[in-house]
Amino acid sequence: EAMACARVPKIVLTVNHASGAGYYAMAGQGFDPDFIFSWPTGRMAVMEGEAAVQAVHGPALDAAKKAGVAPSTEVVEAVEAMRADYEHQLDARYAAARGFVDTIVYPEDTRALLAMALRAANQNRGPHLGAFVLPPMPPVGGE
């Protein structure tokens, strides 16, 4: 509750990995921070790829290991596909293309960008209250 109701600037900079509860606890997207930035090395997701593989395919992999056999071709293909998907989707460019981060910033430009963001966020008088919604537009032709 403290993070959600904070009346101070909330600026996120992902330098490396940001996943799971830690991402949200550090003013992640769910807390509606003023700005979310990432270095090109940033990786953002609900969980890392290997954790997702274990969560979904762990029982089948463990059963095969316990039985002393190789996992089925279907399981191996599904695991490889999931790992590839997560590697692609963890990338900072993937997050930026979908609006999950405001911009990707190079390390050498970080100081100036954070200074600008602090100046801009300082003008915000309180927490955001839900999504921004455009007012209704009049019908075309004034009807």
Image: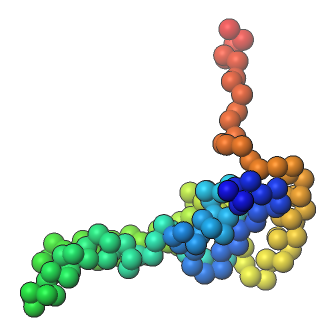
| In the image, farthest residue toward the top | 143
Across and down, in percent, residue 16 comes to 60, 81
Across and down, in percent, residue 103 comes to 69, 65
The answer to whether 44 is drawn above or below residue 128 in the figure is: below
**Residue positioned 20% across, 82% down in the render:** 62
Q: Report the colour scheme.
A: rainbow
| In the image, farthest residue toward the front | 1
Place residue 27 in its image quadrant.
Answer: bottom right
Locate the N terminus and report the quarter of the image it occupies: bottom right
Place residue 56 in its image quadrant.
Answer: bottom left
Locate the C terminus and report the quarter of the image it occupies: top right
Place residue 112 in its image quadrant.
Answer: bottom right
Number of numbered discs visible in the structure rendering: 0
The answer to whether 119 is drawn above or below residue 62 in the figure is: above
Q: Which of 79 and 22 is in front in this view?
A: 22
Across and down, in percent, residue 58 comes to 26, 77
